[in-house]
Image: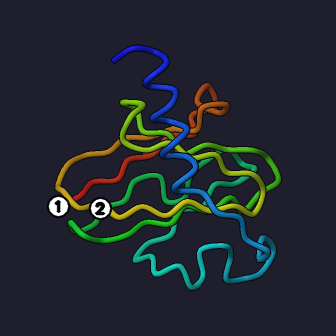
Amino acid sequence: MNKRLFQLLAVGVTAAGVACSDDSTGTAGACAGRGADFVVDGTDGLRFSPANLTIAAGQTVCWQNRGTQFHTVTSDDGTTFNSNLGAGAFFVRTFATAGSFPYHCIPHLPNGMVGTITVQ
């Protein structure tokens, strides 16, 4: 895949998957009411919590940025999903097929901000 096409695909996935929330400080968080089966928090501690999650095919995960630093949720293959998460933002994705989906935060990968969604 050429570099330009990859960039366009990444932008399209990002635009489709990111929404802002006005509940960045509430106890429920940005994922409340989004229909997610599971929530993964991105924090200023530069970790995803939980980092590893096992779900069933067809279930939905919502990542939320509960800190003040910018994060991404980027699949390790660079094409499955990619989302930018400013403070208080969230990203929702339904996993339709079984497999292992490792991901990372681009700016905080050197700090070990990584995770894996395992779909059974």
**Which x, y percent locates residue 103?**
44, 40
Residue 100 is labelled as none
Q: Secondary structure at mark 2?
A: strand
Question: Tag 2: residue type?
Answer: Thr
- Mark 2–mark 1 Cα distance, whole angstroms, equals 7 Å
- Image position of 105 with respect to 88: above or below: above
**Which x, y percent locates residue 43?**
69, 54
- Image position of 58 with respect to 14: above or below: below
Nearest the eye: 7 or 85: 7
Q: Residues within 10 Å of mark 1 (few under 14, many from 20)?
A: some
What residue is at 62 percent from the left and 62 percent from the top?
90
* Quadrant in the rendering for residue 28: bottom right
Q: State if disc 1 and disc 2 touch (CB < 8 Å).
A: yes
Question: Tag 1: residue type?
Answer: Gln
| Mark closest to the chain's N terminus, 2 or 1 | 2
Residue 120 is labelled as 1
Q: Secondary structure at mark 1?
A: loop
Horizontally, residue 22 falls left or right of residue 17, namely right
What residue is at 47 percent from the left and 52 percent from the top?
51
Which residue is identified by label 2? 54
